[in-house]
């Protein structure tokens, strides 16, 4: 009987530790975030940490935000939402215009939408853009789409 009790306790311990381990799983991700300067870096990293990131380091040159977080508590999407709500476009989300407009002048970067539409119908982009230019103001004659 004593042997069965010991085995039961051991099995309970194994199952409990596995579920605890799964809950504490640390995930990491690299997220593209647009910004310009040290002030941007501070705000981006602070926003990511407020959304649950354990670590957040943004590189001004590569525009990469490297985060680690407890997967059970937050996600890459929640972190991106917090960064976008602070005024910075991410790879998947665009910051609200009114928040972006409130950023300090040195922090107002060239927005990803503006870059995409400006490059839309340049000769170098037309060959690969195809339907991405269709209907955009930069390509009124839809020459990009016609080339494909």
Image (cartoon, helix red, strand yellow):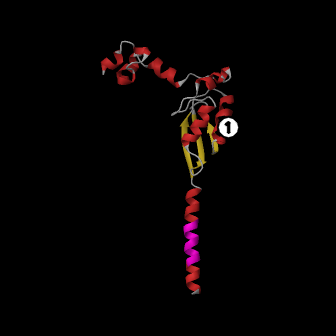
Number of other residues with Cα within 10 Å of mark 1, as a class: few under 14, some 14 to 19, many 20 or more: some
* Quadrant in which the C terminus appears: top left
Q: Can I make out residue 59 in this image?
A: no
Q: Residue at x 55, y 64 (%)?
A: 18
Residue furthest toward the bottom? 1
Magenta range is 8-16
Q: Is residue 15 magenta?
A: yes
Q: Can I make out residue 64 in this image?
A: yes
Magenta span main SS: helix
- In the foreground, 111 or 126: 111
Count of numbered circles on the image:
1
As drawn, 38 above or below 115: below
State the image quarter where residue 76 is shown.
top right
State the image quarter where residue 127 is shown.
top left
Residue furthest toward the top? 141
Q: Residue at x 65, y 42 (%)?
A: 49
Of helix, strand and loop, which one carries label 1?
helix
Q: Position of residue 62 (x, y in %)?
A: 56, 32
As drawn, 55 above or below 35: below
Q: Position of residue 50 (x, y in %)?
A: 66, 41
Q: Pointer 1: what residue?
A: 46
Q: Is residue 52 magenta?
A: no
Q: Residue at x 57, y 60 (%)?
A: 21
* Quadrant in which the N terminus appears: bottom right
């Amino acid at each position: 009987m004593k042997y069965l009790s010991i085995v039961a306790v051991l099995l309970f311990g194994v199952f409990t530790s596995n579920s605890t381990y799964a809950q504490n799983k640390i995930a990491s991700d690299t997220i593209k975030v647009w910004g310009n300067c040290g002030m941007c870096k501070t705000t981006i990293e602070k926003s990511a940490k407020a959304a649950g990131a354990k670590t957040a380091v943004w590189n001004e040159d590569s525009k990469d935000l490297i985060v680690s977080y407890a997967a059970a508590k937050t996600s890459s999407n929640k972190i991106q939402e917090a960064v976008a709500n602070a005024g910075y476009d991410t790879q998947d989300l665009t910051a609200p215009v009114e928040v972006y407009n409130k950023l300090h002048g040195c922090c107002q970067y060239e927005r990803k939408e503006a870059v995409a539409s400006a490059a839309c119908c340049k000769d170098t982009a037309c060959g690969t853009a195809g339907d991405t230019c269709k209907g955009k103001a930069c390509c009124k004659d839809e020459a990009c789409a016609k080339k494909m």
